[in-house]
Image: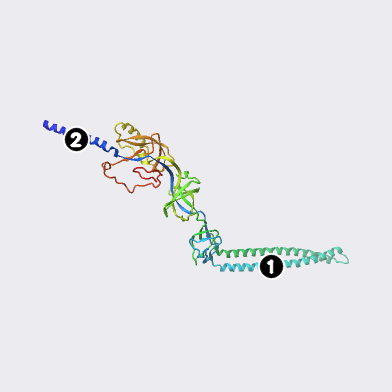
Amino acid sequence: MTRTLRIIVILIVLAAAMGAVLYATSSRQNGAEARFRTAQVTKGDLQITISATGTVQPEELVDVGAQVAGKIVSFGKDDSGKVIDYGSSVEVGTVLARIDDELFAADVAQAEAQLAQARAGLERTEADLLQLQARLDQATRDWSRARKLGPSEALSQSAYDAALSAYEVARANVTVGRAAIVQSSSGVAQAEASLRKARQNLAYCTIKSPVKGVIIDRRVNIGQTVVASLNAPSLFLIAKDLRRLQVWVAVNEADIGNIHPDQRVVFTVDAFPEETFEGTVGKVRLNATLTQNVVSYIVEVNTDNASGRLLPYLTANTRFIAEERHDVLLVPNAALRWTPQSPGRGGERQAGAGARSMAQSVKPEVPALESSSLATLWIPRGGDARPVKVRRGASDGLWSEVSGEEIREGMEVVIGEQLAEDRSGSSSIVNPFAPQNPWRPRTASRPGEGQAR
């Protein structure tokens, strides 16, 4: 290679190196500010919640059954004159249905006849006792005269013995007569009990509402035969008061320790997705259930349904308010997770490396009830980002509470780096399927971040 050719190659290499340096310097000066995606530190409220799914239930249910067997012949009517059906309002004593009572009416007639016979028998034994008592009186008088005379020429020994025997027999007969009365009285009582039982069975043929409420379920039809054996067949299900409802929520064992009575609860139902309902924890049932090796407890949440909008057995998406923070500094969790992918520039290189190791220890969050640890936020400065140590508080999974001497409301913090295409001016593509948290804290609007809910 000639000397001239070597010189040309060296000049070309030097020119390329100088161009790269100039390009990097220009990019740093003109586009460094745009390589970071930032968000503002805001002040607002934070809710730490436990999410679970439950079912809306009436506060008190009454299962009305049949105590006798027979065929349903008719249904009753409610106060408006309509036949009892789903949703009918009933009062105490309202006739719900009638069972064929022909056999039970015959049992009542038979029991009445047996009672009349028993009473007649009692009257006869009472009359017999009067006769026996009269004979006893006669025998007593004869015996008194015989005892005064004694065995003598006026009264033979045989007559004396006969008087004594007659007296003793008459006294025994009276005792027998009194026992017969007791027996007849017991027969009357037994007949009366049989009559009451027959009449009660006859009354059971008319199914009446034991409470005031609303018919939730009707489980029989006219012509259907119900058989009452060991268990009473269920005919109607009545909700006692639909103005007071409960939500039965299955809470995982990992969260049950943060549930307590009178705790505030908010929930939504699919029937009214835009409306939020409130309630309070009533009690935690201790009979846990095991499903696929997952232990859960049923928590009863009491709620007011005076408006009547909630219906029984709706699925409720509940959130137990475990903790609330008011008027605190908040940052997106992405700001706490972000760390530079390469060492910082200039004077930030050593500080960035030390803070990076701390930021990398912060793992992606799930909603936490209580966490307080050191973390690092990155503040954009020129073309670089400097670390700021903060104390991290509670988090709802999307926002976290932070505090520190250097952190202020309105301060910009780095939440990520823009792609090269974004820095060159082209619009970035937003993933429409990215998960969004509907329970964002209520804060003031921020430039570029929108209004937090």
Instruction: Say whether residue 251 is left or right of residue 148.
Output: left
Query: Residue 334 at what x, y percent from top left?
Result: 36, 41
Query: Residue 257 at what x, y percent from top left?
Result: 47, 43
Residue 266 higher or lower than 347, as above or below:
below
Disc 1, SS: helix
> Which residue corresponds to the image point at 11% horizontal and 31% vertical from the top-left?
4
Query: Residue 252 at what x, y percent from top left?
Result: 45, 46
Instruction: Say whether residue 448 is left or right of residue 228.
Output: left
Query: Residue 165 at what x, y percent from top left?
Result: 79, 65
Res 284 seen here: no
Q: Tell me, for residue 413, which label it has, or none.
A: none
Residue toward you, 78 or 70: 78
Mark 1 belongs to which amino acid?
Answer: Gly
Res 22 seen here: yes
Residue toward you, 263 or 188: 263
Q: Tell me, for residue 121, which label it has, or none.
A: 1
Q: Which residue is mark 2?
A: 16
User: Which corner quadrant holds the N terminus?
Assistant: top left
How many numbered marks appear?
2
